[in-house]
Amino acid sequence: MDLIRPPVTNLLPNGGTVHYFGPIMESITADVYLDVLLKTIAWKNDEVILFGKRILTKRKVAWYGDSHFEYSYTNTQKRALLWTQELLELKLKVEEMSGESFNSCLMNLYHNGREGVGWHSDGEKDLKKDGAISSLSFGAERKFVFKNKTDKTTVELFLEHGSLMVMKDSTQTNWWHRLPPTVRITEPRVNLTFRTII
């Protein structure tokens, strides 16, 4: 049976809203989804343009949505694929838990703890301003860190297998976030970030 948990108190001390729900499904259900996502998603190495140079990351990404949206980030253009059945199931679950609605999902595959993401905000012009981003995690439990852009306050949490975190309101304006690398983790992690493209 699926777990039902209310959101925790806002984790950010000021200038944003982050709720961590913890696992929103049984571990065995999360195991099944992880296996399906690893095997069926059209994963590709992410492409980043830095100082005019094209770089392929070890981390892989995929982009799905209601239609073939085009979306720009890290100075590159992405084109969405249409939802798979499993992604639609997860989208509905996330919308039910978060009370938000989404039309797209940017997915990340980290093969092990050596792969992470540096400080950034999800403030691309294609995204709904101050809209919610719901982050659903599968696989290895990883540390996730927020840092306030003004006073440099940091907030850390660990994203568990099958867990949901929701960032919304002015979070992207006032806070950076990152997934720090670690040599201690050897298992993969799949992260689904449900978003609203305008």
Image: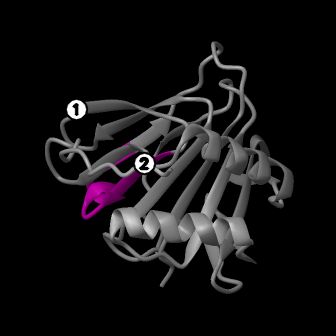
Which residue extends farthest top? 184
* In the depicted structure, whether residue 129 falls above or below residue 155: below
Amino acid type at circle 2 is: Leu
Q: Taking 26 as reference, is 57 left or right?
A: right
Q: Taking 135 as reference, is 155 left or right?
A: left
Which one is in front in this view, the residue at disc 2 or the one at disc 1? Answer: 2
| Relative depth, front residue between 157 and 197 | 157
Q: Where does the image place residue 63, in percent across and percent down from the top left?
A: 69, 66
* In the depicted structure, whether residue 8 falls above or below residue 145: below
Amino acid type at circle 1 is: Thr
- Span highlighted in magenta in the image: 163-176
Q: Badge 1 is on which residue?
A: 153
Q: Taking 180 as reference, is 56 left or right?
A: right
User: Quarter-wise, where is residue 72 in the image?
Assistant: bottom right
Q: Is residue 156 magenta?
A: no
In what element is the residue under mark 1? loop
Numbered label attached to residue 3 = 2
Which residue lies at the image location 58% right of the left edge and 74% below the top edge? 104
Q: Where does the image place residue 194, in percent across and percent down from the top left?
A: 52, 65
Q: Is residue 169 magenta?
A: yes
Q: Where does the image place residue 51, in percent across and percent down from the top left?
A: 66, 49
* In the depicted structure, whether residue 165 falls above or below residue 102: above
Can I make out residue 54 in this image?
A: no
